[in-house]
Every structure is written in C-alpha cells, then in structure tokens.
Image (tube, grey):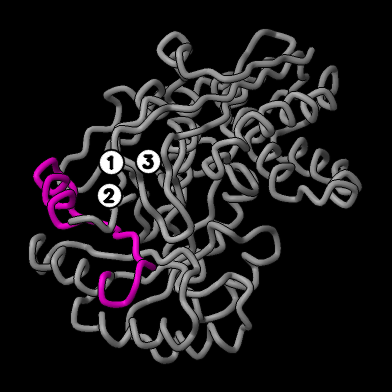
Amino acid sequence: MKPIQIASVEAFSFRVPVQTPIKVAFGTFRDRPFVLVRVTDVDGAQGWGEVWANWPAVGAEHRARLAVDIGERLIGKTFESPQDLFHKLTASLEVLVLQTLEVGPIAQVVAGLDIAIWDLAARRAGQPLHRMLSPREPATVPVYATGINPDAPERFAADRQAEGHRAFKLKTGFGHDIDLRNLRAMREALGPEANLTCDSNQSHTLEAATAFCRAIEPLNLSWFEEPLRVDAPARDWQALAQASTTPLAGGENFHDRQFDEAIAASVLQVLQPDVTKWGGITGNWEVARAAVAAGKRYCPHYFGGGISLMASLQLLAAAGGEGLLEFDCHPNMGREAVVGDLLPVRDGRVPVPQGAGLGAAPDLDLLARYRTWAGKTG
C-alpha cells in the first residue's frame, strides 16, 4: 500500500427533519443529525467518513468542529497505512481524553477519520473496501429493518415485509405489557418464518429482563439486545444469559478491550459494534474477525447517515459469518443522498456495491439545505 500524506480535513454537520418522531427507550429523535468528514491527500485523492452523532442532536456541531481540530494534527504527515494512522492518532490523543473526559466524542471523531482514510486508500487502489480487507466476494448481505417504533409496530413491519424485508427489530423498553403486546402482534402479522428481534437500550433491571425473557420465549426471537445497562455487574449479565433461551446481543456501547472480553465470554452471542462510535474500519475489522472466529454473529450497529451504512456493509461483506446488516427504514436524506438506489432490498438482502472504496459518496448539493456547520483545515 502506498503511504498516505494528508493535505486537508473537512467536516460537515447536518440535521435532517423527520416526519414521524422515532422513539427509543432513552428518548425521541425529532431530527436526524449526522457528521461527515472528507480527507484529501497530497495527490488529490479523497475519502469520506462519518462521525457518530445521532444523540443528542446538538452534539453534531460539536463533533464536526472537533473533527477539524483533531484533523489539524494530520496535515502534512505521512502514514504507512490506515491502521498506522489510527493507532498513532489514538495514542496522540490519550492525554486530551484525560484532560477533557470527552472519551466518546474523541473516539467518534477518530472513527470517522479512520473510515475516510480507508475509503481514500481503497479508492486510490481502485478496489471496493471489502476486498481490501478480505478475499471474500459476496454478491449480497442479509439485512434487518430497524428503528421500529412501539406505536402499532406490526403495521410498519408488515409494510416493510411487503417491500422485501424478512428480518425486523422492535424498539422495546417501554413497559413489560406494551413490549410483549407489540412483539406478539408483530409475530402474528409477520408469520412464523420472519426473523424477529428486540432492543431495550439498557432499560431493564435484572429482575425485569429475566421476566421479559421468559415471556418472549414462545415468540422465538433471534436475539434480545441491550436488556441491561452496559456497566451492570458481570454476574447480572451471566445470570440473565443462563435464564434466557433467547440469545443476548450488544456492543454498540463497547470500546477497545471490552470487545475482547465479550468475545471471550459466553454471555453475548451477537456482537454489534458501531463503526462510527468507536474504532472505525481498523478497530471494527479486528472485532468482526475475532467474533466470527469465535462462532458469534457479527451484526454491525447502524443508525446514522449513508456513509456509516456503507462502511458497515463493507465490513459485514468482508467478515462473513451469520450476521445481518442493520438497515434503517425511515426516510432520511442523510442516507439517501449517499446511497441513492444502490441498496434495493430483495428477499431480505441487499447487493454489495463493487465501486471503489465505500462504493458511494455524498451528494453535497442534495444535503446543502440541511447543513448546520462546515469547516476545513489544511
């Protein structure tokens, strides 16, 4: 791989209004914020990344400004590979993390820059990103419809099933009776063959999660996501795993060594790191390979713009295994202005784009009306 010398880093924050608010256990999305970064090398090659910024909305502008500030450290420097940049940049920011306690935003900016550098390197090589990571050549990957609200979810899911989806994730954590009613209604509407999962966003106590696991057992869910707080005692997670016949899932709120611990343990059978929240391509590729090798399902978490969706897809295509791609079915120009018509859902699967890099780039003209901030260094 040819060394990479950085000439400039740009960042853009956006907020896209939504027609119907999206409800999760910790709050309601009334718009869709996202942050894009563009990295250009001294030869003019470019790559795009995305920084996690989906909650709260006001965090988008902060992360965009932070991306430009951190990007300044890269200008004029040469790196042997994207991995070299990721590890050196991460190490150089350790004191800043201690100084600010902004471990999340800083990790998310590093992830976005890493995605952009991988996209740049793959575009320069004329290869799709998944081929830079792995010799696998999948034509398609399976997807599941996500962001399904607790308000009459069976109708929303049935509409998505008619569009070609075969797997579905309901947002739970709104109360035992409501959650159970919704899952039963979805199973009845979608049929016994539909792949059904749920996500409680860390909202349960051990007692409540155990009761819920017992109640949903007849519904044959593929996984129960984030039933407990991520920082709940290991003994609570172990107790829940022993009590549940439904596989447990998590990982979107892990970072660094937490993935090693989760892969080595038997509690989580489904690993769900978010490529924009920690690690970028470099960190997530290591997690994906280790998870699949350990016999777990790698199902990358996604709820952002189109760049993060394409990055997640490329990682899953490279990793293989029995994982599914999280696929947001709500209208979102932040996704559509990148993906366009590249990912039609047919019988629960989408094609793997074969274009260079991530396989797509943002249409900034389409996004112009939603932009809230832009900046550049270099």
Q: Mark 1: which secondary structure?
A: loop
Residue 338 located within the stretch drawn in magenta: no
- Residue for point 34% across, 54% down: 324
- What residue is shown at x 69% (from left), y 59% (from top)? 256
Q: Is residue 322 above or below residue 148?
A: below
Query: Marks 1 and 2: in contact by CB < 8 Å?
Result: yes
Task: Report the span colored magenta.
Answer: 153-178
How busy is the neighbourhood of tag 3: few (under 14 within 10 Å), some, or many (20 plus)? few
Going by the numbered disc 3, the residue's amino acid type is Glu
- Identify residue for label 2: 145
Residue at the spot of label 1: 329
Gap in Å between the C-alphas at discs 2 and 1?
6 Å
Determine whether 177 is above or below 311 in the image. Answer: below
- The picture quadrant where one finds residue 59 is top right
Q: Which numbered circle lies on residue 267?
A: none
Tell me the quadrant of the picture where the C terminus can be found: top right
Q: Amino acid at mark 1?
A: Cys
x, y percentage for residue 261?
A: 64, 73
Residue type of the residue flagged with mark 2: Ala
Residue 138 as seen in the image, left or right of residue 156: right
Residue depicted at x 47% and y 19%:
370
Q: Earlier in the sequence, mark 3 or mark 1?
A: 3
Residue found at x 85% / y 42%: 93
Between the C-alphas of marks 3 and 1, the distance is 26 Å
Where does residue 325 sit, x and y in percent of width and height?
A: 36, 49
Q: Nearer the viewer, mark 2 or mark 3?
A: 2
Residue under label 3: 137
Please state which of residues 309 and 190 is positioned toward the viewer in this rendering.
190
Judge from the rendering whether residue 183 lies leftward or rightward of residue 84; answer left or right: left
Residue neighbourhood size for the residue with mark 1, other residues' Cα within 10 Å, grouped as few (<14), some (14–19), many (≥20): some
Residue 164: say if magenta.
yes
Circle 2: element type = strand
